[in-house]
Image (spheres, rainbow, N blue to C red):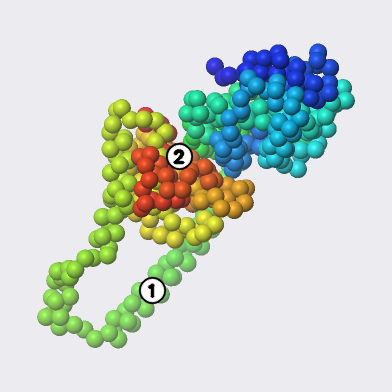
C-alpha cells in the first residue's frame, strides 16, 4: 500500500509543529491542518506535473536524492525562530522553481486564496522542503530507484484530489485530474516502453476494399523498371570483363588459396570484443544473470563514449553494446533499463536532457540489432552518479571513471 505523505507529515510534525507553521504564516491555529494539507497537496501536484516526461522525472529524482534530511520533530523550533524559518524559505524558494518553473507565482496565488490572507509563497516554500524531505526519506529507507519513486508519486493522487486549490490544473494546462501525472504509469523502469495499444490493434473501423487496378498497374511499372536496371547492370559487367586482362591458371590458384594471417587481425579482435565486451562487461552481466541470489537493481557500467556535453557517440563499434545485444538474444525473457549519465558540471536541465538523449541513442542501436522495443527502457539520470563510482561493485574503478551509460536488468522472467 502506498504511503500517504500528507498523513505521514502530520504524524511526524505533531500538533506543535503544525501550529507553529500556522503562526509563522500568520493564519488562525484552527486553519493550520488545512493549510498544511493544501501546501503539501499543491507541491505534490506540481511534482506529478513536472514528472510528466522521463527527463522531468529524472530531474526530480536527482533533486529529491540530493536533498538533505530535515529533522521533522524540531520543526516547531524552526518555524518559530526567524533565522531558521528564513533559511527554510530560501531553500524552499529554490526547490519551488525546480518543481513549478514559470508557474510558481500562479500556483502561489491560488494557494493564498485558501489561507484567509496568508502568504501562498511562504506556505509553498515551507511545504516543498517538507515534501522533498519526506520523499528523500522514503527513497533512502526503501532503496527506491526512479521507477519506485514514480510509483510513490502516482499513488499520492488519491490523497490530494480534493485538497489542491481550484484552478491549479488550469495552471498546469491539464484537462482533468486523472490526467495529472498519468504518463508516470509507463515511464518507470518497472514497465519498459511498450507499443501503444492502438498500434497493436486496429481501431475497429472497416477499411475500404482495395481494388485490383489500384495496386496491379503500379506494381507492373515497378517490375519493368527493375528489369531494365538489371539488364543495364549486366551489360556493364560484361563490358568491364572484356576490358580486364584474364588471369593465368597459376594466378587464379594463388588468389583462391587461403592465406595465413600475419600478426593480430583487427577484425578478429573486434569480434572478440563484441563477444566479451570491455572490462569483461559481458562476463559480469552473465554471471549476475546466472546467480539466483543476485541483488536487485544492480548497475553495470558500459564503455560507450560520447563527445563532451552531447549525445554524439565516439566509439561507433561499441563492443559493450554488441555484447549486450548478444546477451539479450541469449536471454529472451529479460528486460533492461539503459541509463544515461553526465559529469554534472553545467546547467542541470541541459545535462538531464543530454543524459536522456545518450540513453536513447544506445537504445536505438540495440533496436537496430534486432532487440524488441518493449524489452528496453531508456532513461536519463543526469549527474546522479558520483565521479569514479563503479556501479557494478560499489568501489572505484579507474577504467570506468565517469561512466556515461549503464544497464540494469528490470525483469528476469
Q: Is residue 50 left or right of residue 196?
A: right
* Residue at figure coordinates x 64%, y 15% from the top left: 11
Around disc 1, counting alpha carbons within 10 Å, would you say few (fewer than 14), some (14 to 19), or many (20 or more)?
A: few
Q: Quadrant of the N terminus?
A: top right
Up-down relation of residue 25 to residue 304 (above or below): above
Up-down relation of residue 229 to residue 80 (above or below): below
Up-down relation of residue 54 to residue 165 (above or below): below
Rendering quarter of residue 53: top right
* Residue at figure coordinates x 32%, y 82% from the top left: 240
| Pointer 1 residue | 233
Around disc 2, counting alpha carbons within 10 Å, would you say few (fewer than 14), some (14 to 19), or many (20 or more)?
A: many
Which disc, if any, is residue 337? 2
Q: Is residue 296 left or right of residue 271?
A: right
Q: Which SS class for mark 1?
A: helix
Please name which of the two marks, 2 or 1, marks the residue nearer to the observer: 2
Q: Which SS class for mark 2?
A: strand
Q: Earlier in the sequence, mark 2 or mark 1?
A: 1
Which disc, if any, is residue 270? none
Q: Is residue 366 left or right of residue 271?
A: right
Q: Is residue 271 visible?
A: yes
Rendering quarter of residue 209: top right
Amino acid at each position: 500500500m502506498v504511503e500517504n505523505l500528507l498523513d505521514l507529515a502530520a504524524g511526524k510534525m505533531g500538533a506543535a509543529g503544525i501550529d507553529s507553521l500556522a503562526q509563522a504564516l500568520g493564519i488562525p491555529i484552527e486553519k493550520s491542518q488545512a493549510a498544511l494539507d493544501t501546501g503539501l497537496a499543491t507541491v505534490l501536484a506540481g511534482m506529478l506535473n513536472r514528472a510528466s516526461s522521463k527527463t522531468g522525472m529524472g530531474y526530480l529524482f536527482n533533486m529529491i536524492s540530493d536533498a538533505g534530511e530535515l529533522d521533522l520533530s524540531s520543526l516547531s523550533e524552526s518555524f518559530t525562530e526567524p533565522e531558521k524559518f528564513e533559511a527554510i524559505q530560501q531553500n524552499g524558494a529554490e526547490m519551488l522553481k525546480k518543481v513549478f518553473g514559470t508557474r510558481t507565482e500562479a500556483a502561489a496565488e491560488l494557494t493564498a486564496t485558501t489561507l484567509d490572507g496568508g502568504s501562498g509563497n511562504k506556505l509553498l516554500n515551507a511545504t516543498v522542503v517538507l515534501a522533498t524531505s519526506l520523499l528523500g526519506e522514503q527513497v533512502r529507507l526503501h532503496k527506491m530507484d526512479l521507477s519506485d519513486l514514480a510509483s510513490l508519486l502516482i499513488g499520492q493522487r488519491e490523497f490530494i484530489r480534493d485538497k489542491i486549490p481550484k484552478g491549479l490544473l488550469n495552471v498546469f494546462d491539464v484537462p482533468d485530474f486523472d490526467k495529472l501525472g498519468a504518463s508516470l504509469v509507463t515511464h518507470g523502469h518497472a514497465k519498459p516502453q511498450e507499443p501503444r495499444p492502438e498500434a497493436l490493434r486496429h481501431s475497429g473501423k472497416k477499411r475500404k476494399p482495395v481494388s485490383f487496378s489500384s495496386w496491379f498497374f503500379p506494381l507492373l511499372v515497378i517490375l519493368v523498371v527493375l528489369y531494365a536496371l538489371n539488364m543495364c547492370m549486366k551489360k556493364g559487367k560484361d563490358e568491364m570483363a572484356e576490358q580486364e586482362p584474364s588471369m593465368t591458371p597459376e594466378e587464379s590458384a594463388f588468389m583462391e588459396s587461403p592465406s595465413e594471417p600475419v600478426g593480430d587481425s583487427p577484425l578478429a579482435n573486434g569480434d572478440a570484443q563484441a563477444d566479451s565486451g570491455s572490462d569483461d562487461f559481458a562476463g559480469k552481466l552473465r554471471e549476475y544473470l546466472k546467480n539466483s541470489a543476485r541483488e536487485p537493481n544492480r548497475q553495470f557500467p558500459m564503455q560507450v563514449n560520447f563527445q563532451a556535453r552531447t549525445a554524439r557517440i565516439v566509439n561507433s563499434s561499441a563492443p559493450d553494446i554488441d555484447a549486450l545485444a548478444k546477451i539479450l538474444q541469449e536471454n529472451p525473457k529479460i528486460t533492461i533499463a539503459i541509463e544515461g549519465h553526465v559529469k554534472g558540471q553545467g546547467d542541470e536541465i541541459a545535462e538531464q536532457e543530454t543524459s536522456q538523449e545518450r540513453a536513447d541513442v544506445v537504445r536505438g542501436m540495440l533496436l537496430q540489432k534486432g532487440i524488441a522495443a518493449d524489452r528496453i527502457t531508456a532513461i536519463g539520470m543526469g549527474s546522479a552518479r558520483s565521479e569514479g563510482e563503479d556501479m557494478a561493485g560499489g568501489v572505484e574503478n579507474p577504467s570506468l571513471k565517469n561512466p556515461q551509460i549503464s544497464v540494469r536488468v528490470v525483469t528476469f522472467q
